Image: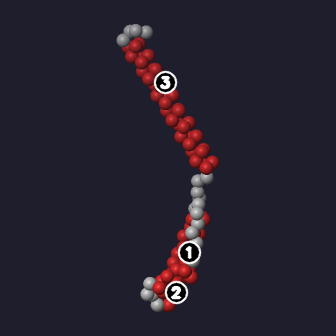
Amino acid sequence: MTATILNIHEFYNGLKKAGFNEEQAEVIANIQGKTASATLEQIKSEELATKADLSEAKFDIIKWIAAIVIGAGVAQIFAIMGLLKLLGKI
């Protein structure tokens, strides 16, 4: 993951160049800095899936799909045998 660090001084100077006065630029830059910090803290506190988590989930999905496919095959065999028995072929 690539982190981008907000340069508050550069942001402040950019606001001043865009026509904001010193007070406006300072308030906006401070709010933006606090918002960026809060967002970074929230991201740090989130639980992210690791490669091992994804691998385990993939294995579980494959396991369930295999069980469904095998179960469906067994059900079809019994259905065919029942039909053959009903028709008197067994």
- Extreme residue in the front direction: 17
For label 2, the SS is: helix
Instruction: Say which quadrant the N terminus sits in.
Output: bottom right
Residue type at numbered disc 1:
Leu
For label 3, the SS is: helix
In the depicted structure, whether residue 5 falls above or below residue 18: above
* Residues packed near mark 3 inside 10 Å, few (<14), some (14 to 19) or many (20 plus): few
Looking at the picture, tell me which residue is in the foreground, 66 or 81: 66
- Location of mark 1 (residue): 6
**Residue 27 seen in the figure:** no
Q: Image point 53% across, 40% down: which residue?
A: 61
* Residues packed near mark 2 inside 10 Å, few (<14), some (14 to 19) or many (20 plus): some
Residue type at numbered disc 2:
Glu
Q: Image point 42% across, 21% down: which residue?
A: 79
Q: How many marks?
A: 3
- Location of mark 2 (residue): 26
- Extreme residue in the left direction: 87
Instruction: Say which quadrant the C terminus sits in.
Output: top left
Q: CA distance from mark 2 to mark 1?
A: 14 Å
Tell me whether circle 2 and circle 3 mark residues in contact (CB < 8 Å): no
Mark 2 or 3: in front is 2
Looking at the picture, tell me which residue is in the foreground, 10 or 45: 10
Looking at the picture, tell me which residue is in the foreground, 27 or 90: 27
Residue 42 placement (x, y as % from top left): 56, 67
Mark 3 or 1: in front is 1
Q: CA distance from mark 2 to mark 3?
A: 72 Å
Residue type at numbered disc 3:
Val
- Location of mark 3 (residue): 74
Closer to the chain start, of discs 2 and 3, is 2
Closer to the chain start, of discs 3 and 1, is 1
